[in-house]
């Protein structure tokens, strides 16, 4: 709106001297029709003065349109028609152009229809009535025709050029905001899911026959957070989860969500991959190292659980969108974390069978999991050939 106001005032100011010169020249050649542009000048100048106090943009636009539509076109009647008036009626085209730039297409169409009626009507009436007063010399009329076309064209060009510049700036700003929105959306959803969400309205739901899910939780973080300032708590957690985000990106995995101090990440969704369990195992070990670096001096440790199996993935709802996973494999992965040990990565048989040839694991035996019964579990130690840490007495390393 500020840009529109500035443009309208600019065009109004540019037309003022044109109207004054136009009127003065006709009066100098003894044609009383020169009074018309001077009246136009006075009305427009008064309108600009009123606008400077009221800032009433629609009112200034309407005065401009009525003034420029009637003053030049009606002048054709006493001057004798289209040619003998020097084409002065062409200035009336600024009324529909103003509506097109400052209002809307529908209003512009109405103003254009009014211009055609007034322009043709005044021109034909002038041809019939003939010159009311003695006409200026032919050379003057020809010169005025050239000036009306040239100067009027310059005003039209200025109007459209500034409008085009403003439109280009607006589109550039729109593209910038669109890029920001796109970036924000991609921080919430996987790219493939975001593209599908923009292209369709129905809920997104996919079945994956084989994927791996990891849950990680900072042990005793809640009681620790109660003893520290909120900014300190959020700061530590932000640095840790930012490090986890970088690990997920490095390993090509998909962060699903965080719940308090719990971090959930998955492999094999939304893009299936045959090595999903291996990739998640590597990230889990890197996560333990990250906690040691970020929170080790605070005496805090990470507890990690991994499971593999079929899952359902999708986006539900329309507000605060979240790409989430459902299924027994997800619930079991969560149980592996909650029934695990601090500083260890606990995995199920489903995950163990997928990675046993490439990773050293420590058999924990069976554990009683609420709602699941007895479940075989292993501790993930390290990739094969990297020097796995020694297993505790009585443990079996496979």
Image: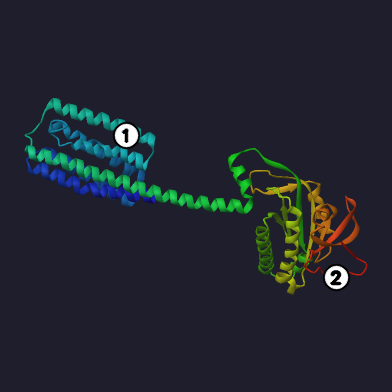
Labelled disc at residue 111: 1
**Drawn side of residue 104 relative to residue 23, left or right:** right
Disc 2 versus disc 1: nearer the observer: 2
The residue lying at 62 percent from left, 38 percent from top is 201
- Write the residue at 84% across / 64% down: 341
Position of residue 350 relative to residue 300, above or below, is above
- In the figure, is residue 223 to the left or right of 371? left
Residue that appears at 22% across and 42% down: 152
Label pair 2/1, CB-CB below 8 angstroms: no
Picture quarter containing residue 358? bottom right
- Within 10 angstroms of label 1, few (less than 14), some, or many (20 or more) residues? many
Give the left or right position of residue 386, taking residue 80 as reference: right
Q: Is residue 192 visible?
A: yes
| Residue in front for this viewpoint, 246 or 233 | 246
Q: Residues within 10 Å of mark 2 (few under 14, many from 20)?
A: few
Report the residue that reaches farthest toward the bottom: 297
Looking at this rendering, what residue extends furthest in the top direction? 128
Q: Quadrant of residue 312?
A: top right
Q: Which mark is residue 390?
A: 2
Q: Earlier in the sequence, mark 2 or mark 1?
A: 1
Mark 2 to mark 1: distance in Å? 88 Å
Quadrant of the snapshot with the C terminus: bottom right
């Amino acid at each position: 709106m500020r840009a529109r106001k500035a443009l309208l005032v600019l065009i109004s100011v540019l037309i003022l001297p044109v109207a004054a010169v136009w009127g003065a020249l006709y009066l100098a050649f003894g044609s009383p029709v020169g009074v018309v542009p001077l009246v136009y000048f006075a009305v427009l100048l008064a309108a600009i003065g009123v606008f400077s106090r009221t800032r009433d943009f629609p009112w200034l636009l309407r005065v401009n349109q009525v003034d420029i539509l009637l003053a030049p076109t009606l002048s054709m009647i006493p001057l004798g028609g289209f040619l003998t008036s020097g084409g002065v009626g062409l200035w009336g085209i600024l009324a529909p152009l103003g509506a097109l730039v400052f209002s809307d297409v529908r209003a512009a169409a109405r103003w254009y229809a009014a211009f055609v009626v007034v322009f043709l009507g005044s021109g034909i009436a002038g041809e019939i009535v003939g010159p009311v007063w003695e006409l200026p010399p032919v050379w003057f009329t020809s010169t005025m025709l050239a000036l009306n076309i040239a100067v009027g064209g310059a005003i039209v060009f200025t109007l459209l050029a500034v409008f085009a510049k403003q439109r280009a700036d607006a589109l550039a700003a729109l593209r910038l905001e669109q890029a920001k929105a796109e970036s924000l959306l991609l921080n919430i959803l996987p790219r493939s899911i975001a593209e599908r969400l923009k292209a369709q309205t129905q809920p997104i739901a996919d079945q994956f026959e084989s994927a791996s899910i990891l849950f990680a939780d900072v042990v005793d973080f809640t009681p620790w957070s109660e003893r520290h300032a909120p900014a300190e708590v959020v700061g530590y957690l932000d640095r840790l989860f930012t490090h986890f985000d970088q690990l997920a990106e490095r390993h090509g995995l998909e962060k699903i969500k965080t719940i308090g101090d719990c971090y959930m990440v998955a492999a094999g969704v939304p893009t299936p991959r045959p090595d999903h369990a291996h990739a998640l195992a590597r990230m889990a070990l890197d996560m333990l190292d990250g906690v040691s670096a970020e929170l080790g001096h605070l005496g805090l440790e990470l507890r990690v659980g991994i499971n593999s199996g079929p899952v359902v993935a999708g986006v539900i709802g329309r507000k605060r969108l979240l790409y989430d996973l459902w299924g027994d494999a997800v619930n079991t992965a969560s149980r592996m974390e909650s029934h695990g040990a601090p500083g260890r990565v606990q995995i199920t048989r489903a995950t163990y069978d997928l990675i046993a040839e490439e990773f050293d694991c420590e058999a924990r035996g069976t554990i009683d999991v609420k709602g699941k019964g007895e479940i075989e579990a292993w501790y993930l130690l390290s990739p094969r050939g990297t020097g796995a840490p020694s297993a505790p007495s009585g443990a079996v390393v496979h």
